[in-house]
Image (cartoon, rainbow, N blue to C red):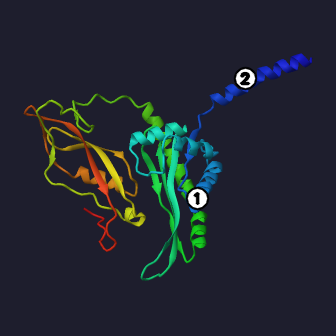
Amino acid sequence: MIRRLILVALLAVPCAGARAQGGPRRVTVAVLDMGSTPTGARVTERVAKLLAPADSATGLSVLDRGMSGAAARGVGYAGSLNLTLGEARTLGAAVGCDFFIAGDAQTIRRSSSARPVYFESYATAFVVSTRTGRLVFWNRPAFTADTAEEAEAALLAALAPNVASYSLAIAKAAAQEEQERFRPAEPAPATVLDLSAEGGANSGTDLREPAPYRSLRPAYTDAAARAEAEATVDAAVEIDAGGEVKDVRVVRWAGFGLDEEVVSTVRRMHFRPAERDGERVAVRVLLRYNFRRPPKDAPVKTQQ
């Protein structure tokens, strides 16, 4: 009788495992360190704790922070919030997650003419997809107070609704990516010369590259100004044989509304068509925009 019970128990174990494996796959999320400051450490810990229980009912699973951090450092990640799609995919793959949250959190002493001394605590958070390398969500809650302790306490208290937004953004992006996997393949596009990579299709050919009739400069956004952000946005732009912009894809993102500003600006541009051997051709080019913090006394442009 005892041998029969043991045999039944052993047979039951693989069945239970098979049911677990046959269930819906959980989306994995890694919370990377948000800076080396004490505020950064406390915000990272708070985000991870808030995300884990909240996500238990949404199909998300938060990875161990120690292992995630070690894996990120192992591929040379040092906290950058200005990554190419390829760099983001490589980082996420090294960590072993479907999405990762990276950011920067600090408490800073500030002063102004209206307020001689005060403190600001902020937490910039970027939610990134490993599969696509895209930035799917970002925000930057910030609070000021007369003391550093009060400012940080206000920030930590306000993280719960922000973390809920991260969870919703991940769930939405995961569902969209799953749909894209099973979407029917689109017809192959007409031949487009790819000039976006170094040593592209113009090598050894009589090629006249496209040129804008009027150069437009994307605005430095209010959100970037508040964060005092400096970043580079790269956009792969497809220009048809008539010189019109057909597609714009951000391949190095920066957040703070700068990516959307670049796409909006490029779509308003018109180009002298590219020519190859005297024939107009469609091309793909890489446009790079460097955003630098303007002087404090300079007005911030929010519209082009």
> Residue extending furthest right?
1
Q: Which residue has dot 1 on it?
A: 43
x and y, in percent, of residue 66 in the image: 62, 45
x and y, in percent, of residue 111 in the image: 46, 77
| Quadrant position of residue 303 | bottom left
Mark earlier in primary sequence (1, 2): 2
x and y, in percent, of residue 218 in the image: 27, 57
Left or right: 206 as drawn, with respect to 135:
left
Image: 222 above or below 11: below
Left or right: 121 as drawn, with respect to 284:
right
Q: Residues within 10 Å of mark 1 (few under 14, many from 20)?
A: many
Q: Measuring 57% from the left and 60% from the top, which residue is drawn there? A: 159
Q: Residues within 10 Å of mark 2 (few under 14, many from 20)?
A: few
Camera-side residue of 12 and 77: 77
Specify the label residue 160 is tagged with.
Answer: none
Left or right: 232 as drawn, with respect to 202:
right
Q: Which residue has dot 2 on it?
A: 14
The Cα–Cα distance between marks 1 and 2, rounded to whole angstroms, is 41 Å
Please state which of the two labelled residues, at mark 1 or mark 2, is closer to the viewer. Answer: 1
Residue type, label 1: Val
Camera-side residue of 19 and 302: 302
Q: Are marks 1 and 2 in contact (CB under 8 Å)?
A: no
Question: Where is the N terminus found, in terms of image quarters?
Answer: top right
Residue type, label 2: Pro
Q: Secondary structure at mark 1?
A: helix
Image: 48 above or below 302: above
Tell me if I can see residue 170 in this picture.
Answer: yes
Q: Secondary structure at mark 2?
A: helix
